[in-house]
Image: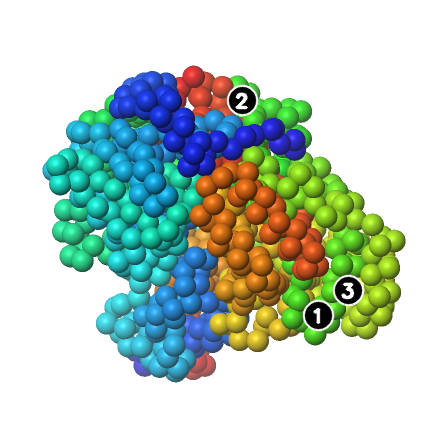
Amino acid sequence: MAIYALQRVFLSALIIAVAVTLLNVMLHLVPGDPAVMVLGPRATPELIERTREAMGLDRPFAIQMMTFFGNLLRGDMGTDVFTGRSVTTIVMEALPYTLSLISVSILWAAAIGIPLGAYSSIRRNTWIDRVTGVLSVGTISIPSFVMALYGVLIFAVWLGWLPAIGAGEGLGDQIIHLILPAFAVGVSWVGYIARIVRASMLEVMGESHVRMARAFGLTERRITRAYVLRIAVLPAVTLIGAGVAHLFSAAVFVEVIFARPGIGALIVAAVNERNYPIVLGAVLITTAIIVLATLISDLVIAWLDPRQREGL
Amino acid sequence: MKDEVHTITLGRRGFLQGAAAAGLAAGTMPLANALYAQSGSVLRAFSYADIDKLDPGFYQNGYNVDVMNCIYSKLARYKPGREWEIELEAAEELEQIDDTNIRFKLKPGIMFSGGYGEMTAEDVKFSFERVLEHDSPVKGDWGPLQSVELDPDDKYAGTIVLEKPFQPLWTITIPYGVGHIVSKKAVMEATEDGSDFGMEPPAFSGPYILEEWKPNQYVKMVRNPDYSGDLKPGYDEIRIIPMDDEKVAERAYEAGDLDYTAISLSSLENYKARPPKNTVIEEYPSLYYVWVGMNVENETLKDENLRKAIQYAINVPQIMDAAYFGAAEPSTGLIAPGLIGHREKSLVPPEGDLDKAREYLEKAGGAPSQPLTIDTLNATTWKTIAEVIQAQLGQIGIQVQVNVQDSGSFWTLGMESEGDRWKKMQLVINRFSMMPDPFYATTWFTTEQVGVWNWERFSNPEFDKLHEAALSESDKDKRGDMYRQMQDMMEESGAYRFLTHEGSPVMFRDDLEPALRPDARPLYLGFKPA
């Protein structure tokens, strides 16, 4: 298990390095001069040239990448070219907002989706199952930004119950500001999780150990809770682990619509401004989180199922 | 949108006459008299962008200056209203002695926060000269500044000395970004050499101080406890909230999360028909100018007749209807109504003339064999403009391909420093911001700017000469004529089809009274409860 874990950690580091290098290549391929963006239209060509040199943009690409990784090993992700602030600080300021958004989104989606899927499977082929199925597929097919727009219109503009923008100050205020964005990001996951749990439940319910439990005269409620749901929920957990990247993407739109700080909004703005250090720093952290989520998921599965350790 | 008739009264002479006649003195400014204090009040306002520089000597854009206006002092500032005027702020006297000397005298008792003492002429000298000394990207705002000489007998007085006359000094230098005064002692302590202090102001002198900046969330300004001037802030707290999209701001306003916001032109008619509760909607003209540019050095567009065919084939009112929902008016040139040098009419009529377009096309030997390209930013308005032009040019047989680009890529399109992309660039939809002086518009179209910001590569020695001469011309009418001639030259070259200045509608709660520049730029210092 230890060797397997080490192999996975090494592979994860490699994935991060490749992702950041590829991103850097792409950034350099697309047109746009960060020095021009930083200095604005009235800077002289001489000043622009001096700034390019100061930013290290005049050096060969390979040297720029080596410098980036060298600095990274010292914990330095560079400096924001506009404000002069540390990239680490900027990214770490934005990250908690995105992490809280995606965590709350997935938690409420799981809290609704798992019982819904389970109930649907127990009452399969009834009108409740059919309604749940239609609702699940309906929520899956509605993009998060559409939910965000309608959420704002209904709950903030028409009803005035919730704020339309911002992240709030203080815990209570932050929770209130999180309700609509988390609803928008999480709603499609309710459908996903409900469908996965339902299908998985139906499969597990047909297995021999469940039939055995019935033969022993256990109640349906006990069989469902103790023998079916605990197994049937595992695919949903795997889905959530693999869906972290999708959640980050959904958060980008939602952060823009709710004028909410976060890593998605930060990356979008930085790409437009050709603010390379911020783009690289933010993508590095995002990639690391996604890779980490996948790594944890793989390790947990490997721990539960030793057969998985053989295939890296 | 209908622009109201404005008269520019902000020239040097106009200002001098007004100042002399009124005998401007400390404590007598209209804004100061009008300002009203209310405790416990918060103003929440929308901004198109977050701040990224708070050193006025190195300011980058108007969003930073909106904040600087509140936390620092200037000799004079823009006066809120529908006409371009300035009024004294930190200066009790400000006088142009001759073409190159401007004498000022500060009000005594303006204090810097943090124990940095009283503002003196030494601080003014330091603030203005450091812009040149440290090669600021915006040193052009100070034009031919030579030095600031101190009055040996009066620590509050001094003289701004120019190498040659510079009219924009009164319109975009003193009342705007680089005109702010910082504490010499505080800046030297913070930076050691007086260079850019970035986002950490070492001392404040305005009625507000920056209490908190949460990047991409808000800028929070509160009353300056050390402020000893005669202005009384209208609010205890001003919170400026940056949002990329004005539609988001509109919804936030409707939800009650904002007190003041700009409105998109596409929403204006709806809001006018069904305004949100307790809301005032006002329309202001904008200084932005939008045009279709043509690269005169491109192999295909070298032919002036082809360019003129394109000019005449473009029907501007149709574009206004499609892209701006009829809420913007066609423009006549670079310079907006109300500013010196505005043209009453363009040479090519707004509707164009398809017959003339065909005549020019025939002289050019027919439509190009390959489709022309039109580059534009990836925003709905620009894409719509490009598509309408594509259809309009199609009427005379010119095929057009629309290239949509993100802002980072688009804004380096015609720059020679970016390689050979400029050679392939043909048509481009462009939009520049503007300050209330015509110099700020024509400066981008000189020969010196070819391959930098002059992407059409228009070059005319007569234009360059007029541009230089107009900087020093103190006669308002003569100066206006010069800028009108320059716009004629641009249009005659066939490289430009001027489209619009857009518009700047805003909405705000009826329990507040905003203080806005004539182009609707907020002057938060003057916002007050109604």
- Residue B465 position, x and y percent, is 53, 57
Residue B237 is tagged as none
Cα distance between the residues tagged 2 and 3: 49 Å
Report the front residue among B497 and B305. Answer: B305
Question: What residue is disc 3 on?
Answer: B306
Can you say which quadrant of the picture contains the C terminus of chain A? bottom left
Q: Earlier in the sequence, mark 2 or mark 1?
A: 2
Q: Chain of mark 1?
A: B
Q: Amino acid at mark 3?
A: Leu
Q: In front here: A74 or A301?
A: A74
Instruction: Say above or below: B413 vs B205.
Output: below
- The numbered disc on residue B279 is 2
Q: Please report contact status of discs 2 and 1: CB closer than 8 Å, yes or no.
A: no
Report helix, strand or loop for mark 1: loop
User: From this viewpoint, is residue B376 visible?
Assistant: yes
Residue at the image position 17 percent from the left and 40 percent from the top = B151
Instruction: Report whether B299 appears left or right of B451.
Output: right
Q: Disc 2 on helix, strand or loop? A: strand
- Distance CA(mark 1)–CA(mark 3): 8 Å
Q: Which amino acid lies under the numbered mark 2 shown in the image of this protein?
A: Thr
Q: Is residue A264 visible?
A: no
Amino acid at dot 1 = Lys
Q: Which residue is mark 1?
A: B302
Please tell me which residue is depicted at 25% across the width and 42% down the height of the picture: B159
- Of residue B291 and residue B267, the one placed in the foreground of this image is B291
